[in-house]
């Protein structure tokens, strides 16, 4: 009922007219913003990676230039390079010529001071297996036959950068004041120093750098709170990683398998570890070859799009609320007169034909309401007129039936006969006269139209006493089975005796032999009063039964055989309920059963234990 109401449909229509356009607008706006933000992010991050790659290349180029400065004293006596050329192994101790210590120490000190991020410098002179180290402003030199110089991972003998690792002393045994190895993460630049123009290596220079400059370059390329950045060499090892636990380790994530033949680009990636866009750019410097990789998650990439969508969604919800309020107001204003009219018709349906509905509207609803109200009043007037005529007609019929014999004459005559019977000692005659008098008194009392069912039963018992005297007590029996709960039920007067009288008119019209009349009164499962009158008379044919039932349906019929039953049914329906029934059925052996079914209707007067 609720889903089919005009009010619900109207509210749904107005809401849909608001929700659908707003939803489509928000969706299109989100998709467009998402695409636009993606394109803008790719462009912006491409510029950042390009700038970051340039800064990193310049930084590494500066480190390379510092190392190349060691070649500046070629063929100059007393230079650093000359000192390396003149170094040779000491057969006894394996140490180099001692007079080059100052030259090497000075050059390494100068190199150490050239970069504030320099952590340590180690020079390994291969001729004497001599380690020269500058750390924390201190210089150490010692024979070091345990050290093996680092080689380029790609197999060449060119300078390279070793990815980030924890600091160490390159096998030097002597320690440094206030320094404990393995505490500081550094990356190392390794340079072989050649005997030019040959490919012979005189010494191996290693410079360790703190990550300060790398971190500064990296910070300019990514948002540390939401994004990830990696600087990877050709072997996939991390020179720098935004996640500290991956620094210096080989990255084996799926996204790390980058296209080998592309200098830069981007692609989307989705797995359990990462969902978003992967952007990369090649690094091709003298010391380091690899890629800068940046991971931008969808959550961060589309944050602006989601913000715009939330704003649009908020506006949409505001429109929805306004539309909902408008829908409710419009639907209630539109359907209120319909609801009033429905309520009015429901009252009319249950019989309140004098109900009234107020309508001051001047539109089509007001006109319709006034027309229906006028029509109902006309119908009410006609029904009341017909109802009064019908009641008057039935009342006159009842009074005419009761007044067929002059009541006063008969009653006085019966009193005289009863007195005479007692005088002649005839109690049987007195009983018969008493029964007849009771019948006359019951019939003559016109003030009461409704009586308890017990009165109707006693009236039938008096009637049957006279019939037994007429046909013989041995030939006629009466069985009455009445539930105690129904004896006090108020019923219309004179509804039971006509049914019994009908038996003698039609069931026993050819004579009585062991005649039996049974009366039962009870309540069925639907709380209806059921009165059944059964006889064992001659019975009735199927065709005649059908004619009688058809005659009962015609309340206005005049057939004498059916008039008594029709009169009873008409009064029941008029005074109690239109649902009252009177049914005739053939018995299995002989005779007919007439059944009255009377609803217990409190509103129409059929009540328990009250007279009207």
Image: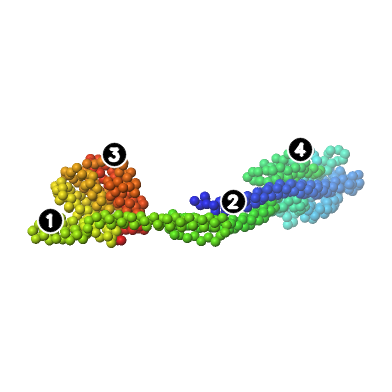
Judged left or right of residue 316, residue 454 is left
From what the image shows, is residue 444 above or below residue 148? Answer: below
**Mark on residue 429?**
1
**Mark on residue 542?**
3
Q: Residue at x 68, y 43 (%)?
A: 269
Question: Residue 477 or 130: which is nearer the viewer?
Answer: 477
Q: Quadrant of the C terminus?
A: bottom left
Please report whichever mark, 1 or 4, sits nearer to the chain's N-terminal start.
4
- Reading the image, the residue beneath label 4 is 261
Please report whichever mark, 1 or 3, sits nearer to the chain's N-terminal start.
1
**Mark on residue 13?**
2
Please report whichever mark, 2 or 4, sits nearer to the chain's N-terminal start.
2
Give yes or no for contact between labels 1 and 3 (Cβ–Cβ under 8 Å): no
Q: Is residue 162 visible?
A: no
User: How far apart are the alpha carbons under marks 3 and 2?
Assistant: 62 Å
Please report whichever mark, 3 or 2, sits nearer to the chain's N-terminal start.
2
User: How far apart are the alpha carbons under marks 1 and 4?
Assistant: 137 Å
């Amino acid at each position: 009922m609720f889903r089919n109401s005009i009010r619900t449909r109207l509210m749904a229509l107005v809401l849909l007219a608001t929700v659908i356009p707003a939803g489509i607008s928000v969706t299109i706006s989100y998709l467009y913003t998402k695409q636009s933000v993606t394109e803008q992010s790719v462009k912006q991050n491409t510029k950042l990676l390009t700038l970051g790659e340039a800064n990193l290349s310049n930084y590494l180029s500066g480190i390379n230039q510092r190392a190349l400065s060691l070649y500046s004293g070629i063929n100059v006596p007393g230079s650093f390079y000359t000192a390396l050329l003149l170094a040779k192994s000491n057969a006894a101790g394996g140490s180099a010529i001692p007079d080059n210590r100052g030259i090497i120490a000075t050059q390494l000190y100068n190199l150490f001071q050239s970069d504030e991020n320099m952590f340590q410098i180690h020079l390994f002179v291969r001729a004497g297996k001599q380690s020269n180290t500058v750390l924390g402003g201190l210089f150490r030199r010692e024979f070091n036959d345990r050290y093996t110089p680092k080689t380029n991972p790609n197999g060449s003998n060119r300078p390279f950068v070793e990815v980030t690792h924890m600091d160490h002393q390159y096998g030097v045994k002597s320690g440094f004041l206030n320094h404990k190895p393995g505490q500081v993460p550094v990356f190392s630049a390794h340079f072989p120093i050649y005997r030019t123009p040959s490919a012979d290596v005189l010494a191996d220079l290693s410079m360790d750098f703190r990550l300060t400059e790398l971190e500064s370059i990296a910070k300019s390329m990514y948002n540390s709170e939401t994004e990830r950045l990696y600087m990877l060499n050709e072997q996939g090892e991390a020179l720098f990683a935004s996640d500290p636990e991956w620094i210096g380790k080989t990255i084996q994530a799926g996204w790390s398998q980058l296209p080998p033949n592309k200098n830069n680009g981007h692609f989307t990636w989705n797995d359990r570890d990462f969902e978003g866009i992967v952007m990369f750019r090649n690094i091709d410097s003298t010391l380091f070859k690899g890629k800068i990789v940046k991971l931008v998650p969808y959550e961060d990439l589309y944050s602006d799009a989601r913000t715009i969508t939330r704003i649009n969604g908020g506006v949409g919800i505001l429109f929805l609320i306004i539309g909902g309020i408008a829908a409710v107001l419009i639907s209630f204003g539109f359907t209120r007169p319909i609801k009033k009219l429905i309520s009015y018709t429901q009252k009319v349906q249950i019989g309140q034909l004098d109900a009234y509905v107020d309508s001051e509207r001047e539109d089509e609803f007001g006109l319709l309401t006034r027309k229906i109200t006028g029509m109902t009043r006309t119908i009410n007037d006609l029904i009341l007129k017909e109802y009064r005529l019908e009641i008057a007609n039935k009342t006159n019929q009842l009074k005419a039936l009761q007044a067929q014999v002059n009541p006063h004459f008969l009653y006085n005559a019966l009193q005289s006969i009863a007195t005479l019977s007692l005088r002649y000692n005839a109690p049987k005659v007195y009983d018969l006269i008493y029964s007849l008098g009771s019948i006359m008194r019951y019939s003559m009392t016109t003030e009461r139209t409704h009586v308890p069912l017990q009165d109707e039963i006693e009236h039938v018992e008096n009637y049957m006493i006279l019939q037994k005297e007429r046909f013989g007590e041995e030939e006629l029996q009466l069985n009455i089975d009445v539930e105690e709960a129904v004896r006090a039920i108020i019923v219309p007067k004179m509804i039971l005796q006509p049914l019994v009288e009908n038996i003698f008119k039609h069931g026993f019209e050819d004579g009585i032999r062991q005649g039996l009349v049974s009366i039962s009164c009870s309540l069925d499962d639907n709380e209806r009063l059921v009165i059944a009158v059964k006889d064992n008379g001659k019975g009735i044919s199927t065709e005649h039964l059908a004619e009688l039932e058809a005659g009962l349906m015609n309340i206005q019929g005049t057939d004498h055989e059916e008039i008594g039953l029709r009169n009873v049914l008409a009064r029941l329906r008029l005074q109690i309920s239109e649902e009252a029934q009177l049914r005739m059925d053939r018995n299995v052996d002989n005779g007919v059963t007439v059944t009255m079914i009377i609803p217990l209707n409190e509103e129409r007067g059929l009540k328990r234990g009250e007279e009207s």
